[in-house]
Image (tube, helix red, strand yellow):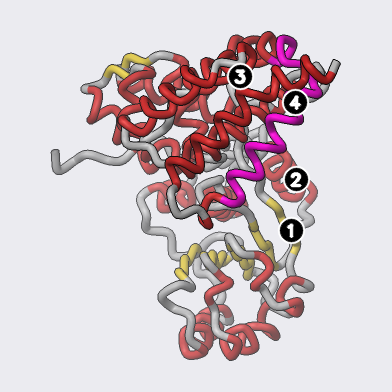
Amino acid sequence: MDNFVVSARKYRPATFESVVGQGHITRTLKNAIQTGQLPQAFLFCGPRGVGKTTCARILAKTINCEHLTPETEACNECQSCRTFNEGGSLNIFELDAASHNSVDDIRELVKQVYIPPTTGRFKVYIIDEVHMLSQAAFNAFLKTLEEPPAYAKFILATTEKHKIIPTILSRCQVFDFKRIENSDIVAHLKYVAGKEGVQFEDEALELIARKAEGGMRDALSTFDQLVNFTHGNLTRELCLENLGMLDEEYYFRLVDYFLAGDISHSLTLYQEVIAKGFGGQHFLTGLCAHLRNLMVSLDPLTLPLIDGSDATRQRYGQQAQQCGLPLILSLLSTAGDYEYRFREANNKNLFVEVCLMKLAALKNAEVQAY
C-alpha cells in the first residue's frame, strides 16, 4: 500500500512522442532543438492537467541530453539523462510560484542564474503557476528574462495567461496548450487499463473523458477512483453512479415523449430523476445540452462536435431526423429560457414541470400551425 503511485504520476509521459493530444507543441519544440533555435524563455499556457509541466520537464531533459536519438528524444543513457531520471539533476530547477511569489524569491533565483553549470549545456528554470508572482517579483525578473546568460533557459507555465503582464509576454515564445480530445483521453485510458489489468466498458471510459473536460490528469485521477469503487471492473452503470452524472438515456426518452406530446410520462420521468438525487438546475442544463447535440447532429459537417462514440452520434442523428430543425429550435429556445430563469423561481420543481408541459405541447402546436 505504501508503494502505490497514482496513475497521473506513474504514466506521466517521459518523451515528446508519448505526450497525448499536444502534437502541435511537441513538433515545434523538437524542430527548435534540431535547428538549435531555442529561445531564452518559453511560456506554456493552457487549462490544468493538459501537459504543460510535463512538456517543460521533457524539454529540459532533452536539451541537456548528450546523445539525442534520431527522433530528437533524450537517450536515457548519458550522465545527464540518468541524473534527471533519478531526480538529482543540478541543471534543472523547479519553482512553484503559488508558494514562492515574493520579490525575494525571484532575487534568489536570479542570483543562481549567473552561476554557470558545472556539467551539461543548459541551466533550465521551470516556474509553475507564474501568474501568481507579485508585481514586484515580475519587475525584478524582467531584465534577467530579457538578457539571460547563454546557458540559461526559462520555462514559465500558467493556467491564466491573461494575468501575465505584457512585458513578460513580449520576452517569451508563447505556446498555447489545448484541451485534450475525448478520443485521445479514451485511447490513453485504454492503455493504462491494459497495463493495470483493469476490465472496462468503452462507454465507461467515455464517461470519464467527458467528466475530465479535456484534462488528462483529471481523467487519470477519476480512473483511479473508479477502479477502487468498482474493484477493477469499470462498467457504465457503476461509473454513472459514482461520478454523479445523469444518464443521457433519460434525455433520449424525454425527447421521445415530446415527439408524442406525452405530458404525463414527461413529468413522471422528471420525478425519476429527482428520486435519484439530481436537482432541477442539473436536469435542465443536461436537457439543453442534449437538444444542442440533436441540433448539430442534423448536419454531417457538425456531427463531430458531439463528444462520444460513433454509436452515440448515430443515435443522436436518428432522433434529430425524427424531430426536424424547427421543432429542435423551439425546444431548445424554451428549455434555454427556463434554465436561465430557474434561480428566480420560488417553487423550483413546479417551475421545471411547467417547462416540461410546454415542451411536450410544442409538437402538437407545430402540427396545428400547419
Task: Please identify the residue farthest to the right as the structure is shown.
Answer: 370
Q: Amino acid at mark 4?
A: Val
Camera sees residue 65: no
Q: Main secondary structure of the magenta part?
A: helix
Q: Which residues are magenta?
A: 320-341
Q: Disc 4 vs disc 2: Cβ atoms closer than 8 Å? A: no
Q: CA distance from mark 3 to mark 2?
A: 50 Å
Residue visible at 70% across and 17% down in the picture: 364
For residue 337: magenta?
yes
Residue visible at 77% across and 20% down in the picture: 366
- Compare residues 302 and 251 and report the one nearer the observer: 251
Q: Residues within 10 Å of mark 3 (few under 14, many from 20)?
A: many
Mark seen at residue 315: none
Mark seen at residue 38: 1
Q: CA distance from mark 1 to mark 2?
A: 10 Å
- Compare residues 36 and 313 and report the one nearer the observer: 313
Task: Provide residue 347's location: percent of width, then percent of height.
Answer: 43, 49
- Residue position for label 4: 296
Looking at the rendered structure, the secondary structure element under dot 1 is loop
Q: Disc 3 vs disc 2: Cβ atoms closer than 8 Å? A: no
Up-down relation of residue 130 to residue 310 (above or below):
below
Q: Amino acid at mark 1?
A: Leu
Q: CA distance from mark 4 to mark 2?
A: 33 Å
Looking at the rendered structure, the secondary structure element under dot 4 is helix
- Residue position for label 3: 258
Residue visible at 55% across and 30% down in the picture: 356
Q: Earlier in the sequence, mark 1 or mark 3?
A: 1
Q: Amino acid at mark 3?
A: Phe
* Quadrant that contains the C terminus: top right
Residue visible at 53% across and 50% down in the picture: 342
- Residue position for label 2: 28
Q: Amino acid at mark 2?
A: Thr
